[in-house]
Image (cartoon, rainbow, N blue to C red):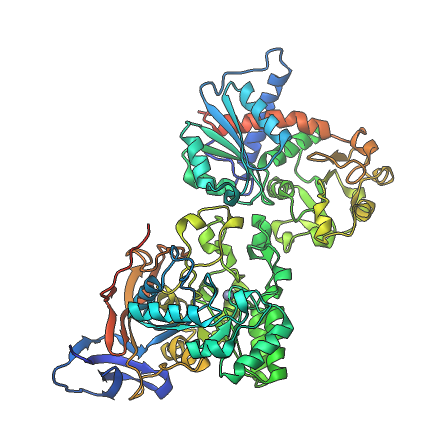
Amino acid sequence: MSTSLLIQKGRIVDPSQNIDEVLDLLIENGKIQKIAKNISAGEVEIFDARGKIVAPGFIDLHVHFREPGFEHKETILTGMRSAAMGGFTAVCCMPNTEPAMDEPGTVGFVLLKAKEGNLIRVYPIGAATRGREGKVMTEIGHLKKAGVIAISDDGEPIYDAYMMRRVMEYAHMFGLKVIDHCEDKNLSQQGVMNEGYMSTLLGLTGIPSVAEEVMVMRDILMSQYTQIPVHLAHLSTRGSVDLVRWAKAKGLPVTAETAPHYFSLSDEEMTSYRTEFKMNPPLRTREDVKAIQEGLKDGTLDAIATDHAPHQEVEKEVEFDMAPFGIIGLETSVGLGLNHLVHPGILTLSKWIDKMSCRPAQILNLPGGNLRVGENGDVTILDLGKEWSVGEIPFESKSKNSPFREIKLKGKAVGTIVGGRVVMRDGEVISKIKDQKSK
Amino acid sequence: MKWNRKHLLGLEDLSQEEIEYILKTAESFKDISIRPIKKVPALRGKTIATVFFEPSTRTRTSFELAAKRLSADTLSITAIASSVVKGESLKDTVRNLEALKVDCMIVRHECSGVPHLISRYLEASVVNAGDGSHEHPTQALVDLFTILEKKKTLEGLKVVIVGDILHSRVARSNIFGMTKLRMNVQVVGPRTLIPKEIERLGVSVSHRLDDVIPEADVLMFLRIQSERQKKNLFPSLREYSENYGMSIQRLKNTKPDCLIMHPGPINRGIELASEVADGPQSVILDQVTNGLAVRMAVLFLVAGGGE
Ligand SMILES: [Zn+2]
């Protein structure tokens, strides 16, 4: 079996080394061996990347793989296939499984499933509190030994400010960052969409933007007080961007991510009560969408994460009020980023790649995020001009709850390479193991 | 004009002409109710089901009677709202009904948007009989019909809608309809019960009923739900009534021909003093009577009688 891969004549864009030119890239024994013009190698597998972009492997800081507990929505294997299809070489999976990832056994199970699936890198995020109930801190030291790379109660905020402080302090001793889902649940109440003109028009209960912002501010203040880094998940409002901008200006160790839907959709697309548009935080106003784009442009928002949240069609085919929150995102993230950020000139290709790969690796101190010699051979290959329509080939994800179904996009990941092994090429996931897809 | 809508989901997507057409059709149906034989064969052979996931005797009775007077077969289903509780999805429930060859479903649900959802799953016509805090189009048509009957014109009239605008489907449908018919609409209520950015629907907002009473041609009061008090949207029914209830004293400041309306059922002594509800300016019982004619018109148009 060949352990060498030569990616030929692609335009290599690596923001971490300021590279943007047509070069060859050689991966041997899973590690990057050489970047140069016209590398000649002997018996190697060739990936012809002419006309394509060769980027450091994309890393998604925020996905929900649903296993254990909700295998009908997604399994670790189908989640990995979905990630590979979308051009991701690594993902961080949130702990809101059943049971929650609040003890080493569950973390070990996830890592085992990921190893069996053997496609992309899966990094589990441990729960901050037992059962994600906000009452008792988990054994963060044990979780770290079991392999978690961060701490979060995502799906829920770490609601109690005292608990947030202690979790941050305690996790910091183990070099783990806390990722918070910023939401004041008293303010969001039973809300199902953004509070504003559209919720008034549709008669749906609103979630005010301030429900997110008060928690963003609390976390920033906590970081200021403790001088401990904190990472804010899926920010969606202008106010949140302004607050993070303020925190960064003060030099606080605060980082933040947003998701593709927050820079590509507003609540004005929700006129038809389609539950594919229901997510938390909700789609906000056009103003907010603009602010998210600005925040990405000026560096206030560090990373783009998908918040990939699979749900079965039957679970979504219900009253809007009763439908679960969340959309899938792994297979549309690249297309949406290119269409709403890169093609319109909001971000340069290099800046966007930075937010898809380099920054995510830096934020959680993960391997990858660059194409330096000696690093893992994790590479994402992009075809910027490829026109496609979302869902025209079935999603690799077990679920299809996407508001982007049938939307036409220009630009797609056409290759995913993990440790020098091609796991996706031209829209086909290359894997020996198949999971039974449920209908 | 020719009617070519299969569903009546709300007034938001109707044109001014369509609303006027329904009102005109309703006028011709009003006579039927005062004939000795109160029945026409317009919908003979059609099956109309009322599917109420949320109880409402008044609206359901009005629709059923309207269907019967048009000679349709009627079917009445009351279901538990939550698909989770029942273990059967909304989609399954309505598809099962359709398998019984129902031509038109009149749907009421506590969740906004359900009639829209259902209309995507079905071949049958769907009439919205109230969805969550969204729309109650036939009630608004009844209100428009009643105002037109009393005032002979609608354009330029000043209508004040008082109460829980945030949760009111009656308010939304009336706002959509009235602004299309070029009426001036003002909503009045405590700040906590006025939804965000409602001005963008073309209405003005006030929190002081006494300020707006003298100019009103129509004062429409909405039913207040005491459970809102538990959510701290207002402190007590007593204080609500003091600020937003129609008392005898307040009635003295109205124009003499100002109409008093209420979609019912009234909390007597809270939204309206009994003397006001039963007084000469009140058109509350006319609203009930007209409900029949308007719903006959709607069913006639959407259920295919218009062909
Ligand atoms: Zn979250």
| Residue B2 visible in the shown view | no
Q: Is residue A279 above or below residue B90?
A: below
| Image position of B92 (left or right of B211) | left
As drawn, the residue found furthest toward the left would be A42
Q: Quadrant of the N terminus of chain A?
A: bottom left
Q: Is residue B267 above or below residue A195?
A: above
Name the one closer to the observer, B295 or A316.
A316
Q: Position of residue A90 (x, y in %)?
A: 36, 73
Q: Position of residue A156 (x, y in %)?
A: 54, 64
Q: Position of residue A188 (x, y in %)?
A: 61, 59
Q: Quadrant of residue A369?
A: bottom left
Q: Is residue A373 above or below residue B113?
A: below
| Image position of A172 (left or right of A86) | right
Q: Quadrant of residue A60?
A: bottom left
As drawn, the residue found furthest toward the top would be B36
Q: Is residue A135 above or below residue A245?
A: above
Q: How many marks?
A: 0
- Residue at 37%, 82% in the rendered image: A367
- Residue at 72%, 51% in the rendered image: B230
| Image position of A55 (left or right of B54) | left
Q: Position of residue B174 (x, y in %)?
A: 63, 40
- Residue at 80%, 28% in the rendered image: B280
Name the one closer to the observer, A11 or B102.
B102
